[in-house]
Image (spheres, grey):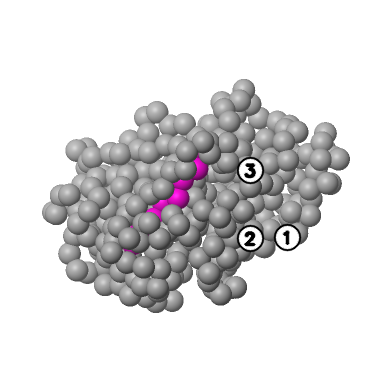
Amino acid sequence: MHSCSLLSLATAVPPNRIAQSDAKELGRRAFGGKAALFERLSSVFDNAGIDQRHLVAAPDWYEHSHGWAERNAIYLQAAEQLFVEAASAAIAKAGLTPKDIDGVVCVSTTGIATPSLDARVGPRLGLRPDVRRVPLFGLGCAGGVSGLATAARLASADPDSRWLFVTVETCSISIRLDSDDPAAVVATALFGDGAAAAVLGNGNSGLATIAGSAEKLWPETQRIMGWDIEDPGLAVVFDRAIPPFIERELAPAIDAMLREFGLERGDVGRFCCHPGGVKVIDAIETALELPQGELDLEREVLRDFGNMSAPTVMFVLERLIERGLPQRALMTAFGPGFTCAGLLLEAP
């Protein structure tokens, strides 16, 4: 694709903040009917590398059972608010008004919105009635990278246009507390909620240049990560094989992506990765032969916000830009499929 500029970036989180120690006690009460399962896995709270998270519902909401309709109602209310907050900030940081936005790419996989979130909040946000809308569903944690790449391709295809990218996820209300699946306890220890937004357009100004994108889908890996659709709502799919899979498969996938750009791993000044969990971060460092602790910003974001799915890598990018973007950086994120998405950024 032709390059385009990342003009701005903004993030947002819901108001309910919970310390990890309190989340552990909340989980213990919420899993009261599955006490043996919870206690067997409760150490994951202590070893997750998370200090706090933000939730779209008050803590006591999680101690009760909720059906699909109620969960989705909370998703819609919270996602709309987070969308407006992140998008408004990104547009303002770009020095634009909502009327200047020509198109919107929205990524969200933790609820159902029909009409889509961009249609629901467009008038409130002040977007034009003729704004082009591209809602994307099913990308999971990879959506922060693949969604941003989609917006970049659309912006570069129309040189005079400006595109807004927004990703909103409310992972916490999708946790199943009535499940016998160990993945439900792990999700309770990891997931938080949040949103991120960016404005893209053409020109040499901005935070970074988006120079290319790539993606890798591994066949026969659909049960590694995703959601199962069940009567009470979404149920997380997590396979314990994710870290060893990354250690084994990531480097060849990244090298193939870089070859598409005419680059090698040594040409990348910094990898900007989705911090899915401590073991995932460790696996990325091992696979890419990075020094232990190299992905410090990823660990910081995980510590401060937990795993928010798609928006999380945008929080990492925000901190990387604040610290100083190297000449080249490669954003990466894993998602259902099993997929690795990559996006090449260059300093302006």
Q: Residue furthest left?
A: 160
Query: How far across and down, in percent of the image, does residue 131 sit?
Result: 22, 41
CB of mark 1 within 8 Å of CB of mark 2?
yes
What's under tag 3, amino acid-wise?
Asp
Q: Is residue 40 above or below residue 5?
A: above
Which residue position is annotated with label 1?
47
What is the distance, in whole Å, between disc 2 and disc 3 at their CAs? 15 Å
Query: How far across and down, in percent of the image, does residue 101 sit?
Result: 23, 50
What is the distance, in whole Å, between disc 1 and disc 2 at their CAs? 8 Å
Which residues are drawn in magenta? Answer: 337-344
Which residue position is annotated with label 2?
278
SS type, badge 1: loop
Q: Nearer the viewer, residue 338 or 228?
A: 338
Quadrant in which residue 116 is drawn: top left
Q: What secondary structure predominates along the stretch shown in magenta?
A: strand
Task: Give the residue drawn at x 32%, y 54%.
Answer: 213
What is the distance, in whole Å, between disc 3 and disc 1 at their CAs? 18 Å
Q: Return the disc, 3 or 1, that comes first in the chain's sequence.
A: 1
> Does the magenta-highlighted stretch encompass residue 223?
no
Q: Return the disc, 1 or 2, that comes first in the chain's sequence.
A: 1
Marks 3, 1: nearer the viewer = 3
Question: Circle 1: is it few (<14), some (14-19), or many (20+) Cα within 10 Å?
Answer: few
What's under tag 2, amino acid-wise?
Val
Task: Give the residue drawn at x 53%, y 71%.
Answer: 290
